[in-house]
Amino acid sequence: MLNKLEACGKNRYYLKPSGDMRVEALILLSPKLRQQFDEGEALKQLADAASLPGVVAPVIGMPDIHTGFGLPIGGIMATDLEAGVVSAGAVGMDINCGVRLLRTSLDAGALTSGLLEKLLDSIEKRVPAGVGKASRYREFRQPDLEEVVKGGAAYFIKQGYGYAGDKEAIEAGGSLPGASLGAVSRQARERADQLATIGGGNHFIEIGKVEKIFAPDAAAVMGLEENKVTVLIHTGSRGFGHQICTDYTARMVQAASRYGIRLPSKGLAAVPIDSLEGQEYLAAMACAANFAFANRQLITHLVREAFTEILRLPLEEIGLELVYDVAHNIAKVEEHRGRKLLVHRKGATRALPPGHKENPALYRATGHPAIIPGSMGTASYVVLGTERIGETFNSVNHGAGRVMSRKKARTSISAEEFQASLRGILLRAKDLRSLFDEAPVAYKDIDEVVATLVEAGLTRPVARLKPLAVIKGEGEEA
């Protein structure tokens, strides 16, 4: 029986160790989100993570926390690099699901509904959406996979699919070290035909605008201005990453007992970081992470093509420059509190504080942007981590977080409710009914979720983005 959550500061709740827990858990919730939080499976999953060998206190739940596979989505688990474990389930199925933000010089008022429709047509012509969809371009369906998984976004930037400055505005420069295609199964390689696609689930391409600036100084560094058009691209490693997670979860389940590890659940299958299985997983995970960085880079290139085609303006006038690109599902070796740790972020975003040496030069003084996309039809945010963000291993939430299961959303939301929730936003999808589980009512209030960390002193809001038109893909990845 788990202990109950106890308040331990502004928007902070503490779960004392009990049962097999080796360390405590910390959940960040506003009073309103605390009332909504069901102390059920998601809390148990945090407690399970806190029972793994070498875990470092605390295991953390973000305000968008909800039940996942193994570790809850919105969960952060750090393990000691020498004595700890790595878990494929604590990274997630869609390795490096992430989001990038592009800014433009365009006034939002100049994009009529007719122009928005044409832009959506042009993007859809280039970027397939939906589960199982392969690239429309042969060179992306049959890429030099060895080069892609090692070079990530940088590989395609060198090939001419991007601006020279794009690399500096991507987490880890768009390429994690240590990737080895030899650690990837044949089945996963066969699913590497989905570059330049967004897939299904909560992934999207969104044309929007900067609705409000909260921090003019930081917004100026990022090149964000009120009422200027923006583009958000939210997708990951597609079937390639899913297969890698599936493969290594099964392998870790089989291997755990050999290392004396008692698993709390299959979803948290884990092995020592320095084991053969652990090292090969990290090499395969880096392949998927770099594939995802490359995927978002190619989509960016195709979005730039679409804008120039429809607006008949040179890119120099449009802009579409990269503000930043962040990963959501990833494990990275980082230094915290004087120790080297493997930080698993599942449905969580890294947010380095001002002055951190790993910030890009442009963002050294402010900290790099963390981009928090809302649910379909609601606002998104750009925030910065404060000097106190080390409390969460330099992590913030990655979105709004579900408050309703997909099954419940599909059966309880009417077509009328769904249409009303879009509030005049243009939505492009083949079957709107298939997207009911992505309706705003199925998610927590993004404003409340973002305010939770702001009030806790962990983040500083920079800008609020409003959607104008969205492309969504149907289905869930498998």
Image (cartoon, helix red, strand yellow):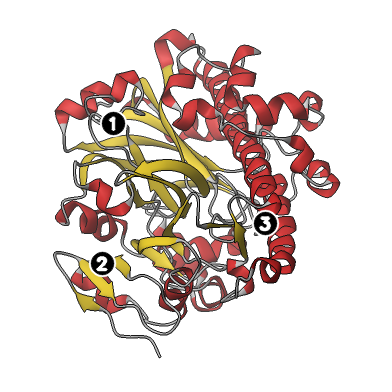
Residue type pointed to by label 2: Leu
- Quarter of the image that includes the C terminus: bottom right
Give the SS element for disc 1.
Answer: loop
Residue occupied by mark 2: 29
Give the SS element for disc 2.
Answer: loop
**Are the two marked residues, 1 and 3, in contact with CB atoms closer than 8 angstroms?**
no
Q: How crowded is mark 3: few (under 14 residues within 10 Å), some or many (20 or more)?
A: some
Q: Can residue 269 be seen in this view?
A: yes
Frontmost of labels 3 and 2 is 2
In the image, which disc is placed on residue 477? 3
User: Which of the 4 image quadrants contains residue 447?
Assistant: bottom left
Residue type pointed to by label 3: Glu
Of callouts 1 and 3, the N-terminal one: 1
Q: What is the distance, in whole Å, between disc 2 and disc 1 at their CAs?
A: 26 Å
Q: Position of residue 128 (x, y in %)?
A: 68, 39
**Residue in front for this viewpoint, 423 or 393:** 393
Residue at 68% across, 43% down:
284
Q: Position of residue 127 (x, y in %)?
A: 65, 34
Residue occupied by mark 1: 356
**Residue in front for this viewpoint, 368 or 123:** 368
Residue type pointed to by label 1: His
Of callouts 3 and 2, the N-terminal one: 2
Left/right placement of residue 81 relative to residue 59 reads: right
Q: How crowded is mark 2: few (under 14 residues within 10 Å), some or many (20 or more)?
A: many
Q: Position of residue 291 (x, y in %)?
A: 65, 35
